[in-house]
Image (spheres, coloured by chain):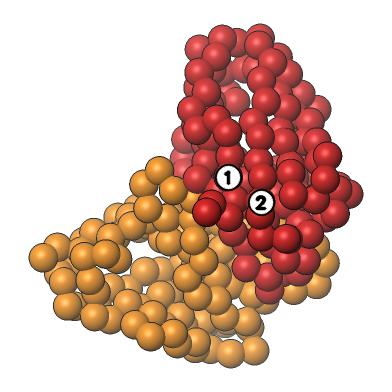
Chain colours: A orange, B red
Amino acid sequence: DQQVKQNSPSLSVQEGRISILNCDYTNSMFDYFLWYKKYPAEGPTFLISISSIKDKNEDGRFTVFLNKSAKHLSLHIVPSQPGDSAVYFCAASALQGAQKLVFGQGTRLTINP
Amino acid sequence: DTAVSQTPKYLVTQMGNDKSIKCEQNLGHDTMYWYKQDSKKFLKIMFSYNNKELIINETVPNRFSPKSPDKAHLNLHINSLELGDSAVYFCASSQEGRPSDTQYFGPGTRLTVL
């Protein structure tokens, strides 16, 4: 029973345009959310996070939006660049207790020149 | 200078064998993890250790035994390998194991059981 889901296995976007990656969760105890980026043959690397007291967090070209009522978060990348082509994982955890990240299955983003 | 390293990168073995995967981190972190990425691509936590003490054990078969000789190392030993153990295994570490700590991942070990 997957508590974090990324329903789009892949996404293709033109260079310079906005990329929007989506993630849904079911566990209302989750109050901390993260995005990780993964290149082939490498481990995931942390990209950006948001806690449930916020609805938006921005870091350069990357913005994460959280809609707690809908149990939905999204990652916006603007403008998209070829180096952004990677698999993006959404993850969630509860701030109380041991650090246990629950990951989605990832979305493969391809940026076309 | 690799922050979290794993060996081997690839491991191909027969069913029934016993194998180990090693993980080392040079970040000075207190907490280390093992994750399994299955064929459906979900990354699922298996174990976490904080300063050599087991913190999380996620209903993993007891054929899997993590061993932490010191806080910089967390090795994964698997007995009596089964076909379903084929997956990519990732090691990770974080500063203190708090939910808000960033986890740093190794490059993964692709295990294939024949």
Q: Which chain carries label 2?
A: B
**Secondary structure under the numbered disc 1 in the rendered image:** strand
**Secondary structure under the numbered disc 2 in the rendered image:** strand
Count of marks, rendered view: 2
Task: Kindly report the distance in space between the C-alpha atoms of the residues bearing marks 2 and 1.
Answer: 6 Å
Image point (82%, 45%), residue name: B70
For the residue pair A113 and A96, the one nearer the viewer reads as A113
Disc 1 crowd, CA 10 A, few/some/many (<14, 14-19, 20+): many
Residue most toward the front? B1
For the residue pair B29 and B12, the one nearer the viewer reads as B29
Asked if residue A43 shows in the view, the reply is yes
Q: Which chain carries label 1?
A: B
Residue most toward the right? B53
Give the numbered dot on residue A18.
none
Q: Where is residue A51 in the image (x, y as percent from the top left)?
A: 62, 82
Instruction: Say which residue label 1 marks.
Output: B5
Q: Which of marks 2 and 1 is nearer the N terminus?
A: 1
Image point (74%, 49%), residue name: B72
Image point (50%, 45%), residue name: B107
Specify whether B28 is left or right of A62.
right
Q: Do the residues labelled 2 and 1 touch (CB within 8 Å)?
A: yes
Q: Position of residue B19 (x, y in %)?
A: 66, 20
Q: Position of residue A109 (x, y in %)?
A: 29, 60
Disc 2 crowd, CA 10 A, few/some/many (<14, 14-19, 20+): many
Image point (57%, 80%), residue name: A50
Instruction: Say which residue label 2 marks.
Output: B25
Q: Where is residue A15 in the image (x, y as percent from the top left)?
A: 16, 71
In the depicted structure, whether residue B101 falls above or below residue B103 = below
Specify whether A64 is left or right of A21.
right
Amino acid on which the number 1 mark rests in the picture: Ser
Amino acid on which the number 2 mark rests in the picture: Gln
